[in-house]
Amino acid sequence: MKRYLTPWNVLGGLLFVLGLWAFFYAGRVPPTRVVNPPAQVVTPEERPRQVELKLYFAGEKGFTLERRRVELKPFESALKRAIVELVKGPDVAGAVPLLPPGSPPPAVFQSGRVVVLDLPASYRELGYGVRGESFLLYGLANTALANSDAEEVRFLLDGKPAMALIHLSLLDPIRRAK
């Protein structure tokens, strides 16, 4: 009669159980791509000034670029103002707003060469499809990149990292084209 409880069988069984544990539970660890919003950085300008903002709106054949001249108040960031103007909607014919009227703008943070846009939780209930959501995210990112010296844009949802808005991933940054 063969013995089943040998040291090799016990060791093999333990390795098997450890492998099962690693297979089922190691994949449940949250991703390490956590983005913590940096402190708001504003370049100080003590007097009002005129700037030209580049805003990217949805159009029939892709994005429509609108150049809008605005006067910035003292200590106001051009990047933050560009995002607020983008949410207000387009002034040019043929451009479609990215958000419904009255939508809150995302919070804007910049640290070095990274812009972080903190999307409000209400953006999840917009009911956009994949196309509308891609216009929203890429319109925000293109506007942020065009009005700053940043190299990439990251997204948060309601102050926390999120896997996706609805359809598109928010984990990977949108980088400036080279």
Image (cartoon, helix red, strand yellow):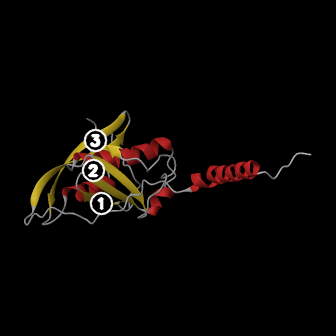
Is residue 109 depicted above or below 144 in this figure?
A: below
Q: Are marks 1 and 2 in contact (CB under 8 Å)?
A: yes
Residue at image location 84% in from the left, 49% down from the top: 4
Residue 144 disc label = 2
- Nearest the viewer among 131 and 149 is 149
Q: CA distance from mark 3 to mark 1?
A: 17 Å
- The picture places residue 33, in percent across and down from the top left corner, at 42, 53
Q: Are marks 3 and 1 in contact (CB under 8 Å)?
A: no
Give the residue type at disc 1.
Answer: Val
- Tell me if 8 is positioned left or right of 78 in this view: right
Residue 178 disc label = none
SS label for mark 1? strand
Which mark lies nearer to you, 3 or 1?
3
User: What is the residue that sits farthest to the top in this orientation?
Assistant: 61
- Nearest the viewer among 165 and 8 is 8
- The picture places residue 65, in percent across and down from the top left corner, at 26, 41
Residue at image location 24% in from the left, 49% down from the top: 150
Q: Which residue is mark 3?
A: 176
Q: CA distance from mark 2 to mark 3?
A: 10 Å
SS label for mark 2? helix
SS label for mark 3? loop
- The picture places residue 118, in percent across and down from the top left corner, at 37, 60
- The picture places residue 66, in percent across and down from the top left corner, at 24, 43
- Total labels: the figure holds 3
